[in-house]
Image (cartoon, rainbow, N blue to C red):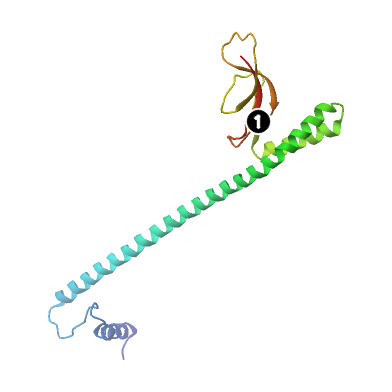
């Protein structure tokens, strides 16, 4: 009666003898077990090399996928900012009109409250006003609409009045401030 181990050995001998050309053939008539052992060692090395090749490929694919995911998230964030930029550009004239109405009707608390809420929402989305009055003229952020002569002891051009406010969105110029400059 055969044990299970001896059945497995017999089956593996049968499978090996019917294998492909790369398989190790078990030869019962071979007197030298060393030859069989060397063939098995060679086959093991080939299998290990193949395993390493597949593992390396899988690891590269994982890294490529992680990089793809990161680039995709960055691109979505950029698109979101760009879409927000267009919407905020469209809202700026409304904000200008609201500020003009607030100046014309300084006693209207409803207008002040509405203007404050709109500015708060826009600030939350990254919009910042460009400081202009009594600042030195900066051509990156200011557009000169009018020049006036004045005793400027500091040298350079100082902004005396703001005609239209300028804004920066997430550190990027959205609209330059239109200003009056003293020379």
Q: In the rendered image of this protein, does residue 93 appear above or below residue 140?
A: below
Badge 1: how crowded within 10 Å, few (<14), some, or many (20+)? many
Q: How many marks?
A: 1
Q: Residue at x 85, y 34 (%)?
A: 110
In this orientation, which residue lies closer to the viewer: 54 or 92?
92
Residue 131 pos. (x, y %) = 65, 25
Judged from this view, the residue extending furthest toward the bottom is 1
In this orientation, which residue lies closer to the viewer: 43 or 138?
138
Quick one: SS at disc 1?
loop
Q: In the rendered image of this protein, does residue 1 appear above or below residue 164?
A: below
51 horizontally vs 126: left or right? left
Residue 83 pos. (x, y %) = 63, 47
98 horizontally vs 160: left or right? right
Determine the image quadrant of residue 54.
Answer: bottom left
Residue 153 pos. (x, y %) = 60, 8
Q: Residue at x 64, y 44 (%)?
A: 86
Q: In the rendered image of this protein, does residue 113 appear above or below residue 54?
A: above
Q: Residue tagged by mark 1?
A: 166
Q: Residue at x 64, y 38 (%)?
A: 126
**Quarter of the figure with the N terminus:** bottom left
Q: In the rendered image of this protein, does residue 87 appear above or below residue 3?
A: above
Residue 135 pos. (x, y %) = 62, 19
Q: Residue at x 22, y 78 (%)?
A: 24
In this orientation, which residue lies closer to the viewer: 160 or 35?
160
**Quarter of the figure with the C terminus:** top right
């Amino acid at each position: 009666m055969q044990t299970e181990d001896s059945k497995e050995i017999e089956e593996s001998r049968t499978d090996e003898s019917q294998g492909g050309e790369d398989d190790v053939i078990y030869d019962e008539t071979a007197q030298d077990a060393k030859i069989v052992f060397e063939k098995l060692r060679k086959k093991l090395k080939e299998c290990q090399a193949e395993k390493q090749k597949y593992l390396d490929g899988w690891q590269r694919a994982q890294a490529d996928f992680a990089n793809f995911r990161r680039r995709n998230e960055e691109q979505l964030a950029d698109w979101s900012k760009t879409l927000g930029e267009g919407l905020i550009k469209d809202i700026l004239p409304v904000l200008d009109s609201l500020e003009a109405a607030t100046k014309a009707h300084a006693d209207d608390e409803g207008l002040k409250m509405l203007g404050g809420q709109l500015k708060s929402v826009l600030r939350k989305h990254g919009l910042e006003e460009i400081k202009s009055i009594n600042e030195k003229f900066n051509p990156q952020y200011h557009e000169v609409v009018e020049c006036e002569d004045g005793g400027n002891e500091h040298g350079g051009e100082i902004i005396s009045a703001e005609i239209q406010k300028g804004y920066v969105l997430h550190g990027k110029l959205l609209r330059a401030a239109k200003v009056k400059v003293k020379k």
